[in-house]
Amino acid sequence: MFKQRKNKRFSYKPRFSETEEEKSKTNFEAKWNEARRETQRRGSFLTSLPALIIMLIAIIVLMYVLDGYMN
């Protein structure tokens, strides 16, 4: 009875083709891995968490001992 409309076809060209997308993706991954390697440098022992906790305990003990001398 009624003719249904057919989908119109456009000659749409994507802004970025798939090959460029793959290139940019691999380029991004390479840059990301390089940045990660730079930030994964080994910190010194004095700035590690266990060392800081031990220093904090040592300071508290030292304060307790010095407080005993004052009284």
Image: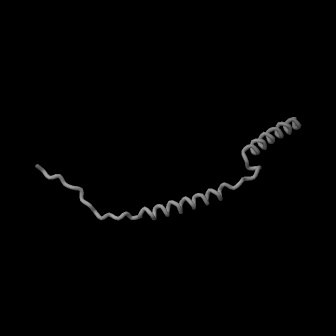
- Counting from the top left corner in percent of width and height, residue 22 is at 48, 61
Seen from this angle, which residue lies furthest front?
19
Above or below, 71 relative to 17: above
Above or below, 65 relative to 31: above
Seen from this angle, which residue lies furthest right?
69
Seen from this angle, which residue lies furthest left?
1
- Counting from the top left corner in percent of width and height, residue 63 is at 82, 39
Above or below, 30 relative to 45: below
Q: Is residue 39 left or right of residue 66?
A: left
Q: Is residue 16 left or right of residue 59?
A: left
Relative depth, front residue between 69 and 44: 44
**Mark count:** 0
- Counting from the top left corner in percent of width and height, residue 59 is at 80, 42
Q: In which quarter of the image is residue 31?
A: bottom right
Relative depth, front residue between 11 and 44: 11
Q: In which quarter of the image is the C terminus?
A: top right
Q: In this view, does 25 lie to the left or right of 36?
A: left
Name which residue lies at 46% across and 62% down.
21
Name which residue lies at 28% across and 62% down.
10
Name which residue lies at 73% across and 47% down.
48
- Counting from the top left corner in percent of width and height, residue 19 is at 45, 64
Q: Quadrant of residue 69?
A: top right
Please, which colouring scheme is shown? one colour
Relative depth, front residue between 61 and 23: 23
Name which residue lies at 39% across and 64% down.
15
Relative depth, front residue between 48 and 32: 32
